[in-house]
Image (cartoon, rainbow, N blue to C red):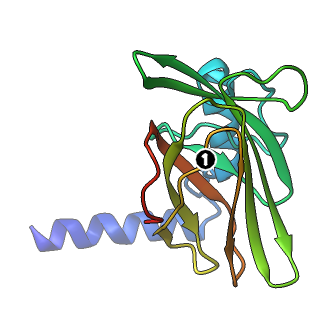
Amino acid sequence: MIGSALSGLVAVLAGLLAGCSAPPAPEPLPMASMMAATAQGDSSRQCGAMSCRSNGVPYINDKGAIVIFPGEQFVIAFEIQDDKIVSAVPKPTGGHLPNAIEVSFKEIDSGMMLSLQSHLPMDLKYDAAMKAPDNRLVYTSSCPVRASLGSYESWPHPIKFLELSNFRIQDGGPCQ
């Protein structure tokens, strides 16, 4: 058995040396192309009321979190039923903003800052995860956003992007 396998291997090597070669393996799609294909497949779910990003990364990832990159700002509009948030959809800034928060994420001298301006009649809490420079996705604390007020979160280091999720109505509470 080993002898026949070895002779088969010798025949393949001889064919390669004689100018015959196996067809090249297909090149994998770059991550941005795969994300763009996903975004184009269901852009209403992943991009909300906005056009998807030019780099193909959707605004809503496959876990349902809203993704914001440094330098971006947009509105997150909420559908509220029975004092519960049932959906959160990113939208372009501007216009009348009931049941929404404006979000802005930017680099500042001392690190990174997320600004949230509430247009909600109640306090809002959310979960946040950050993509650290070493590519780990790390949970980070967040403070409640008070009704009709602003909130600021800051970090003393670079962040590639933030994922915001689990938006909920919450009366005050600690930053956690």
The residue that appears at 51% across and 19% down in the rendered structure is: 80
Residue in the foreground of this view, choosing between 35 and 90 = 90
The residue that appears at 72% across and 21% down in the rendered structure is: 98
Question: Would you place residue 34 above or below residue 104 in this image?
Answer: above
> Could you tell whether 62 is left or right of 133 in the image?
left
Question: Would you place residue 20 above or below residue 132 in this image?
Answer: above
Question: Would you place residue 44 above or below residue 8 in this image?
Answer: above
> Could you tell whether 63 is left or right of 33 in the image?
left
> Could you tell whether 75 is left or right of 59 in the image?
right
- Seen from this angle, which residue lies furthest left? 1
Residue 45 found in image quarter:
top right
Relative image position of residue 131 (x, y in whole percent):
59, 67
Question: Would you place residue 87 above or below residue 168 in this image?
Answer: above
Relative image position of residue 144 (x, y in whole percent):
53, 53
Name which residue type carries label 1.
Answer: Arg
Name the image quarter holding the C terminus: bottom left
Q: Residue 25: in sight, yes or no?
A: no
- Seen from this angle, which residue lies furthest top? 81
> Counting other residues with Cα less than 10 Å from the Cα at mark 1, is it few (<14), some (14-19), or many (20 or more)?
many
Residue labelled with disc 1:
146
Residue 94 found in image quarter:
top right
Residue in the foreground of this view, choosing between 145 and 11 = 145
Relative image position of residue 72 (x, y in whole percent):
83, 50
Relative image position of residue 48 (x, y in whole percent):
68, 24
Determine whether the residue tagged by mark 1 lies in a helix, strand or loop: loop
Name the image quarter holding the N terminus: bottom left
Q: Residue 151: in sight, yes or no?
A: yes
